[in-house]
Image (cartoon, grey):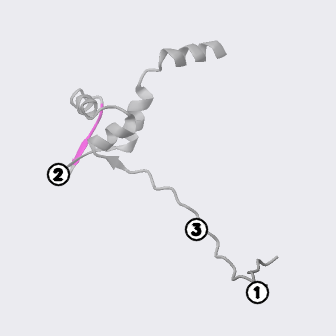
Amino acid sequence: MLEQNEGGRPLPERKPSRDTKQAPTPLAYRPAAAAQVLGVSRSTIYQMMADGKLAARHLGGATLIAHEELVRVLEAAPLTPHTKFAQASIK
């Protein structure tokens, strides 16, 4: 059924709304952004880089950390005691 205005005339058809596209995941982050993504301080990121726990690359004048590297670091981090307890109680 067509929508009508107050005068009884049909309203023009509405264009379908554009699908909102989610922004693509960045390939790499600068240290400050990487810290924000992981939820740690910028100094923690630099310390992890200095300790060899986090690989970073230089591209031009920028220090960049690959998205996959942040995922790897997070996956390698130990589970919290609460998580371990919850997992043990399921078994």
Res. 3 visible in picture: yes
**Is residue 55 found inside the magenta-colored segment of the image?**
yes
Q: Is residue 22 left or right of residue 45?
A: right
Above or below, 19 relative to 1: above
Q: Residues within 10 Å of mark 3 (few under 14, many from 20)?
A: few
Of marks 2 and 3, the one in the foreground: 3
- Residue at the disc numbered 2: 61
Kindly report the secondary structure that dominates the magenta region of the rendered protein. Answer: loop
Q: Earlier in the sequence, mark 3 or mark 1?
A: 1
Q: CA distance from mark 1 to mark 2?
A: 62 Å
Q: Nearer the viewer, residue 36 or 26?
A: 36
- Residue at the disc numbered 1: 9
- Disc 1 vs disc 2: Cβ atoms closer than 8 Å? no
Of marks 3 and 1, the one in the foreground: 1
Of marks 1 and 2, the one in the foreground: 1
Q: Position of residue 66 (x, y in %)?
A: 34, 44
Q: Is residue 28 left or right of residue 82?
A: left
Q: Quadrant of residue 89?
A: top right
**Is residue 14 found inside the magenta-colored segment of the image?**
no
